[in-house]
Amino acid sequence: MKQNPKALGARRRLTRGLAAALAALGLAAAVAGTAASAHATPAADTASELRIGANHNQVLV
Amino acid sequence: MGASTQHTAPGPGPVRVGLLAQMTTAREHWRAGDYPAAARVLRDAVAAAEATLGPDAVECGVLLNELGIVGKYAGDFAAAEAAYRRALAIEERRGLPAGANAAGLLHNLAGLAHARGDTETALRLARRGIEVRAALPFPDPAGLAADRAALAAILVDLRRYGEARIVLDETLRGGVPRYDTAVALHNLGSSRYREGHPGRAAVLLRRALALKRAELGADHPDLAVTLHNLGRCLEKLGCRRLARRQWRRAVAVLDGAVAADHPTLIACRQRLAAG
């Protein structure tokens, strides 16, 4: 059966979102001091955008 | 906080996955440049986290931190500070030794002070955040690199250009993600401008702009600060018409996305009004 490309795209986005959310669960554990650094596992690396401390400073001249 | 202790370490479950999925949604809104939508999702998520997991849950702090970040980008500095302080208070109430969460919050409070123009406070908080992170029981080189890159922007505003350049060059050599590279190039270019090299600065700022466009799209409000600084370089180089084009573009991407008193929006409008 041929897949609807839009549905396929939506499913992929959902999968990515869930993967990020699950990886972030690992981050929450790291933040609580109950696990190693969020950088220690490849799964956490894929969710690096979700890690605490993502603020960036930019100079206005 | 004995009453909340039972809520502080829930096992992974649908509630936590749902909350973190909301955080992912908020991040998507941020990437699309829709700060108000990101803030709405995060406020709802914080309320849900407090109701279901308790006010001292780790998730509340993580979500409040995200809310603070969005507030900073949107120019809603008071809301951002309130969110960061609430998150820090959660850390303190949990009674844990200062950890990665506290280091991240100090990093972000420093960034907020920097955005508000309070450079001395920003420096103090940024240094404290680096101390806390360096003392963690596990190594966090990526976190430390991000802290130092953020500190570099503060050093530029303190006219400590040499120190800032060393850190930013290290950041650029470190193979960081595209957005981090763009921000480092932006700050390096801004440093060059301040040092009296508008031509070199413009080259760096154009590279930063190209990376930001590739990462965030051409209409993202985060492009504005780089457009503004590029305009300043072009003005200094005698290209007034081109400079005004950058400032107009910056106003276009900021208008409606950030607070009316956002520093970059005000600066662009002042440049344009100057004729």
Image: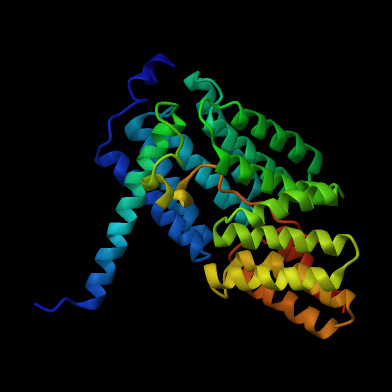
- The residue sitting at 50% across, 59% down in the picture is B30
Residue B116 visible from this viewpoint:
no
- Residue extending furthest bottom? B241
Instruction: Tell me what residue is drawn at x 62 percent, y 64 percent.
Output: B222
Answer left or right for A31 relative to B145: left
Examine the image and state in which quarter residue A9 appears.
bottom left
Percent coordinates x, y for residue B249 in the rendering: 68, 77
Q: Position of residue B203 (x, y in %)?
A: 75, 73
Q: Residue furthest top?
A: B2
Looking at the image, residue B42 sits to the left or right of residue B256; the answer is left
Q: Quadrant of residue B132?
A: top right
Q: Is residue B61 above or below residue A24?
A: above
In this rendered view, identify the residue nearer to me: B147 or B111: B147
Point 79% across, 61% down: residue: B190
Q: Nearer the viewer, residue B95 or B71?
A: B95
The colour scheme used here is rainbow
Q: Residue B247: x and y, percent?
A: 74, 75
Residue at x-position 53% and y-position 33%: B139
B104 over B97 or under it: above or below: below
Q: Nearer the viewer, residue B48 or A15?
A: A15
Q: Residue furthest left?
A: A1
Q: Residue B238 at x, y = what percent?
A: 90, 81
- Image quarter of the N terminus of chain B: top left
Instruction: Assign the C terminus of chain B to one quadrant of the image.
Output: bottom right
